[in-house]
Amino acid sequence: MKTFLQKITPHYFFLISALLFGGFYLYFVPPLQVPDEHDHFRRAYHLADGHFLPQKENNRLGGKMPISFKEYVQPFRFAATNLKYTLDNTHYKQAKAASLYKDEMAFDDFPNTSNYNVVSYLPQTIALFIGKNLNAKPWILYEFGRIFSYLVWTVCMFMLIKKLPVCKWLFSVLLLLPMNLYLSNSFSADTMTNLFSFSFLGLSLNYAFDGRKFTAKRLYILLFIGLGLALAKVVYVWLIVSFLIIPVERFNNIRQKISLFLFILIVCLMASALWSLHVKSNLIAYADYNAAYKDNCCLSHCANFEAQKEIILSDVTYFPKVVYRSLFKHPYTYLAGYIGTFGNNDIPLPRGIFYFAYLFILWVAYKEQNEFKLSIKQKLILIGASLASFLTLLLSQHLTWDCVGEGIVDVLQGRYLIPLFPAIFIFISGVRKNETRLFFIPILLFVLLINLSSFKIIYNRYVKKTFISNLEWICDLEKTSNDLLATSDDSVFVQGTPSRCDSISFSGKYCAKLSPASPFCFTYKFKNITQGDLIEVSAWQKGEDCQVILSTVGKKCGEIYQTNHGNLIPNKNGWNKLHYVFTFNEPCKLTDSTEATFFLWNPKNQACYIDDLKFSIKKFGTDYLNHKSTLF
């Protein structure tokens, strides 16, 4: 056993670990939980459907999607955006029941991912193309794309580590960090971006130390990877500068080296510039976006590309201050995110674990046995390439996402640093002839510790029931009692019998018809709603768009009136699913004896039909985190 542990190679350790832990992430992480993954999923399907450019329609940006996608995505989107929303077998059964209906299409908004190039989703697009032509259900499309993409990433990184002349264990540890595995096991465009960035750096290291001449084949390989990197994420194009670590001795002369470098760099810069012009031509600011859809898609409310650019150009000191503030005002956000922050960037690993992770990575970089040594010049080239890409990243984020004149990059996430940090760790590497015996053991224990810690956090976030009580009822309008509508809970009756109608229904004999003659239904009065309660409402709707109303009156929190409507999930038979989840964030406490009224209202002249309404309210312990975002 000891001999085996001493002889195991980094690339096989990576392969075994990636397949093992990849299976765990596939099992533990629900679909569509990586940031913006539901939009990446739509973009990949749009590409698989033959649309390499986004579609514009009525000041909207996205493309036509099967109507069943919303039905599949919705519960997982709730889980991604609300910390208190957990998933059970019912959610998965409903998601698996959704059929593709690829001939039933409707325009869908995904402006934040619609301009991503096809290279960002190559494995996912191939998988979706195969699946959709087999008329596979949405859940099969998603799982097939997710697994196939992860396997492509795993095989490519295995081959890369095998070829590396230095820092094999370092690369293995970096690639097995929870954030890397989490992203690679999804539809995120980061998968291919990280694959291209690691590949270009790794092959540059290989070509620098393998002792062979630089050939035309090597030129085309690096050009292909460089183009992939430039088109996948423009800001990382400067990582191509790592080409310069290849010694002059591998070329005929210094002129050939510089000429080939400039050739790769200029071609990649031209490709990225052309794609950037296309992206810029398709940008729609929040103020100009279709008002009916702008709040249901990922757009910055206060960003303005041209206005922000004008501020940067008018004050030479402005952007350096932005860089300084972005680095030092809240470093924990991106430093923790590089190691592992899950969900919607809202469930990080504990601070102690992520501090330990950085110390361990530095230890591996310093102690690893390397036959070759990078010179200070080569290390500075790698640092310079990463720094240039980092500054470009900050500039891009500030122009497109931050409020005009805000003076800081607010959306700097740790996952953006995955292509950049290897250069920092390589900087402290050196030549070690006598590596610590059983060097593999601490690496194995570290990888186990940090990923098992991640699985525990992910389980607690998505699966473990955190509420302390749950009141839930369903009203199908089939039974009445004392002029009230009966529900699935024998203790709960709701008002609305005048709206009861037998001319149409989604299920059973009756539904509710909300019209000018009877505009209200499902009125339910209850007490003691408090801050942090999670409310979920769903129903089947046909006709006009009804409004979901919640009004409250408390001794100290005053009168509150909340409403929501729209964002329906289409169904093939003409009924649409109304489904809302929100955390009640008003400052009402249990001692306020707050009275609440829930009901549906149709303020329009044309009728709205509602059937099978489900209402639930979950309460949580006082120490449970109250998520401030709300869909109401």
Image: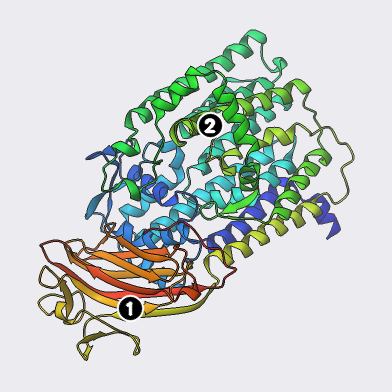
- Residue 153: % across, % down: 55, 45
Front residue of this view, candidates 134 and 378 = 378
Check disc 2: other Cα within 10 Å, few if <14, some if 14-19, many if 20+: many
Mark 2: secondary structure? loop
Disc 1 or 2, which lies upstream in sequence?
A: 2
Residue sitting at x 47%, y 53%:
146
Residue sitting at x 44%, y 33%:
400
- Residue 72: % across, % down: 36, 61
Per the image, the residue denoted by label 1 is 525
Q: Report the number of discs.
A: 2
- Name the residue type under label 2: Gly
Front residue of this view, candidates 128 and 528 = 528
- Residue 318: % across, % down: 55, 24
How far apart marks 1 and 2 lie (CA) works out to: 47 Å
Per the image, the residue denoted by label 2 is 407
Residue sitting at x 44%, y 63%:
586
- Name the residue type under label 1: Lys
Q: Quadrant of the N terminus?
A: bottom right
**For residue 390, side relative to residue 563 (left or right):** right
Question: Would you place residue 248 above or below residue 243 in this image?
Answer: above
Check disc 1: other Cα within 10 Å, few if <14, some if 14-19, many if 20+: some
Mark 1 or 2, closer to the camera: 1
- For the residues bearing labels 1 and 2, Cβ distance under 8 angstroms: no
Q: Quadrant of residue 430?
A: top right
- Residue 469: % across, % down: 49, 79
**For residue 315, side relative to residue 4 (left or right):** left
Q: Quadrant of residue 567?
A: bottom left
**For residue 370, side relative to residue 64 (left or right):** right
